[in-house]
Image (cartoon, helix red, strand yellow):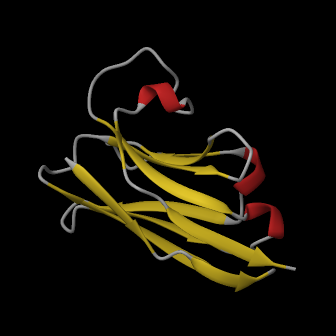
């Protein structure tokens, strides 16, 4: 499976942005899908994930109430709606797929074996 993230851009603080992660090659309906982000000079960090059962979602504490992850298996796409954006949300946002069983937490980068190329989100103050 290949992942292509899109939707990044420049937005003012307090604004909104919607990201998409389009998958190709295989259906993602059986995969846990996630968004991570990486700011310059910082480690990649978990943002949100959506399960392959009942679409249960998980969020990092710093995005709860502001970001919403969703999936449309018919379109083979995962989304991240970002509201109330802050300058500290500036980062490259990457989508990832967990295609095999793992003992790693779904909040860990090590749990995901397929990654998209990322899309840059810049939030100005």
Total number of numbered discs in the rendering:
0
Extreme residue toward the left, this view: 25
Extreme residue toward the top, this view: 103
Quarter of the figure with residue 20: bottom left
Tell me where residue 13 appears, x and y as whole percent. Answer: 81, 80
Q: Answer above or below: position of 82 versus 113.
A: below
Q: Answer above or below: position of 89 versus 51.
A: below
Q: Nearer the viewer, residue 84 or 88?
A: 88
Residue visible at 69% across and 84% down? 11
Residue 46 as seen in the image, left or right of residue 100: right
Q: Nearer the viewer, residue 78 or 44?
A: 44
Residue visible at 55% across and 58% down? 93
Q: Answer above or below: position of 109 versus 97.
A: above
Q: Which image quarter is the C terminus in? A: bottom right
Tell me where residue 118 appears, x and y as whole percent. Answer: 47, 59
Residue visible at 40% across and 45% down? 96
Tell me where residue 8 appears, x and y as whole percent. Answer: 53, 74
Q: Answer above or below: position of 9 versus 57.
A: below
Tell me where residue 78 appears, x and y as whole percent. Answer: 37, 61
């Amino acid at each position: 499976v290949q992942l292509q993230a899109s939707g990044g851009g420049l937005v003012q603080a307090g604004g909104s942005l919607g990201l998409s992660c389009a998958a190709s090659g295989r259906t993602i309906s059986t995969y846990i899908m996630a968004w991570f982000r990486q700011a310059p000079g910082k480690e990649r960090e978990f943002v949100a994930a959506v399960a392959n059962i009942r679409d249960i979602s998980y969020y990092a504490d710093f995005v709860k109430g502001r970001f919403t992850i969703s999936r449309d298996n018919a379109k083979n796409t995962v989304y991240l709606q970002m509201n109330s954006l802050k300058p500290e949300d500036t980062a490259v946002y990457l989508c990832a797929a967990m295609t095999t069983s793992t003992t790693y937490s779904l909040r860990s980068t090590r749990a995901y074996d397929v990654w998209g190329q990322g899309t840059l989100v810049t939030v100005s103050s």
